[in-house]
Amino acid sequence: MDFVHAVLFAILQGATELFPVSSLGHAVIVPKLLHWPIDQSSPDFLPFLVMLHLGTAIGLLLYFYSDWLAMARGALGLGYAAEVSATRDLLLKLIIATLPAVVIGAVLKKPIAHLFGSPLIASLFLVANAGVLLAGERLRGRALRGGHMNNMDALIIGLFQCLAFLPGISRSGSAIVGGLRRGINHEDAAHFSFLMGTPVILAASVAEIPKLLHAHELHALFGVSLLAAIVAGVVAYASTAFLMRYFKQHDSWALKPFAWYCAIFGAGSFVLLAVGL
């Protein structure tokens, strides 16, 4: 992979990981459509992808630094009693919301692994992602009394997030839809989704590091991968900042533009890939 395509791929990863349009779907489809010289089955690609995800996770950690610091202080019992209770409650909800992905991911990883390399399948699931986002807007639950999220809300959001095990279904989008269904507004659902996604992305990346530390591919690509990770982190940070403002300002219809984009891009990609263009 050359420098230009590494940076372009990093921008693609950093943006689509947060936007509700599926980073995995775009990572499979876009290089194929644009004929980028990237072999995703190559042993060189895994170290590069791990570095991108680490960069994305660090970008998220930096944006939500105050939240994670407050949760760390709460876990240690530091601060006023009310603050400790609130931050521990949020941490518990994040743990509850993450559990379904751990359990369901362990069960589904092998059976659906063959789907992940197919651009045609990913393009169809992008269209399905559009349906998920539109359904989320249409079937929004009533506003929560007092805006309080309970443990069942967190569990439901975590279950919705598991839709993203299908290539082309957005993790952040499905989690936000789960929040909408439980009566949470776009901004708060996105906030919780991004917090929930940070340890998931980070853990998935860190789990691969021991396998890569002594791999020749990591050393061969380290310079390009490090630069790409920095780019992905900066783009992820900027994307998060934009989306948090966007969801706050457009609460009545925020997911619809992303839904129509996924429908058009997914259907168009399917046609182009099917005819071999």
Image (tube, rainbow, N blue to C red):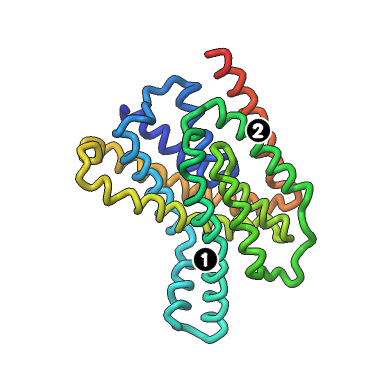
Reading the image, the residue beneath label 2 is 127
- The crowd level at tag 1 (other Cα within 10 Å; few <14, some 14-19, many 20+) is some
- Tell which of 73 and 25 is nearer to you: 25
Q: Residue at x 29, y 34 (%)?
A: 44
Q: Residue at x 57, y 17 (%)?
A: 274
**Rendered image quadrant of residue 131:** top right
- The crowd level at tag 2 (other Cα within 10 Å; few <14, some 14-19, many 20+) is many
Reading the image, the residue beneath label 1 is 95
Give the position of the N terminus as an image quadrant. Answer: top left
Above or below, comparing residue 109 to residue 128 in the picture: below
- Tell which of 137 and 115 is nearer to you: 115
Residue 188: which numbered mark, if any? none
Pointer 1 or 2: first along the chain? 1
For residue 117, side relative to residue 265 (left or right)? left
Horizontal and vertical percent for residue 252? 76, 50
Horizontal and vertical percent for residue 217? 24, 36
Horizontal and vertical percent for residue 119? 52, 27
Query: Label 1 vs label 2: CA separation?
Result: 30 Å
Above or below, comparing residue 98 to residue 169 in the picture: below
For residue 12, side relative to residue 184 (left or right)? left
| Type of amino acid under label 1 | Ile
| Type of amino acid under label 2 | Val
Mark 1, secondary structure of its residue: helix
Above or below, comparing residue 95 to residue 175 in the picture: below
In the rendered picture of this protein, how many numbered marks are placed on residues?
2
Q: Residue at x 62, y 48 (%)?
A: 174
Horizontal and vertical percent for residue 243? 59, 49
Mark 2, secondary structure of its residue: helix
Q: Residue at x 64, y 39 (%)?
A: 129
